[in-house]
Amino acid sequence: MASFTTFTGLGRSIDPRLRSHRIAFAGALASAVLYAAIAAATDRELSDALTVALVVFIAWAIGRELDPDLPQVAVWAMPLGFAALLYDMPSALASAVALIGIRVVAGTIGSAVTWVDVAALAFLGFLSGSEPVLWIAGLTLTIWLVTSPEVGSLRFVGLASLGAGIGLGAWLADPSNVEIAQDAYLLAAAGGAVMMLAMRPSAVISITDARTGPVDAGRVGLARKVAGAFIMWAAVMGGVAGFWMVSPVLAALVATAFAKWFSPGA
């Protein structure tokens, strides 16, 4: 992975020698096979099995970010994510964007970012700033750019791009196109309640992937808030459909809240 990390400080390798990574792959594969069996017996789309594997893996990955010390949180997130997608299939893209935001805020990787990272995330920020539904992604990236030491002087490039995107979004946005459903606030409140139950880590002893030091407990706590914010924003902007669109985030946050109350040190 040396050549890969030369270009990016935000990438994370998958090591099959690690038991937690083998569990993640096995869980994603098992979910896809189980969904395929369900699809064969019902009117569900068999092709969705690939999406199922991806979103279940994303639920695991978010769980690892929200509680780096307890691998079981990520394991619990997988069946929860699978159960949620049986009700309504989430968006793999929206969930992946949420994972990126949660990961960079949590600071679990620990590597200094590169120009490639900032260019990619600045572009993501520009897109999110130009579309009101995605403003939560822009806000998350702003928090990361302002508060994270690994960004260094490249934060100004990222902030400038985010500002340009938000400016364009404010200019082009038509508030009349945003309709907030009556149940949106109840769903957002439910997401906020789960977030509060997950607050905050008592301590974090895990070290960063880059071996630059221990993961900062404050940043992990902030990442949990970001996860809750993604859920609440999705609910407000999309109602029931938006709420379930990021169900892998919800699954990981529920698993984190469970661990917070029933596992020492969470």
Image (spheres, rainbow, N blue to C red):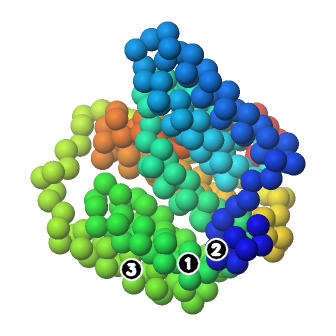
Mark 2 = which residue? Answer: 8
Neighbours of disc 1 within 10 Å: few (<14), some (14-19), many (20+): some
Q: Nearer the viewer, residue 156 or 123?
A: 123
**Left or right placement of residue 102 versus residue 170 in this view:** right
In this view, 86 is above or below 78: above
Of pointers 2 and 3, the one earlier in the residue sequence: 2
Furthest residue toward top: 41
Give me the C-alpha separation between circle 3 and circle 1: 14 Å
Give me the C-alpha separation between circle 2 and circle 3: 19 Å
Residue type, label 3: Ser
Q: Are marks 2 and 3 in contact (CB under 8 Å)?
A: no
Neighbours of disc 2 within 10 Å: few (<14), some (14-19), many (20+): some
Mark 3 = which residue? Answer: 161
Mark 1 = which residue? Answer: 116
Quarter location, residue 134: bottom left
Neighbours of disc 3 within 10 Å: few (<14), some (14-19), many (20+): many
Q: Are marks 2 and 1 in contact (CB under 8 Å)?
A: yes
Tell me where residue 70 appears, x and y as whole percent. Answer: 79, 45
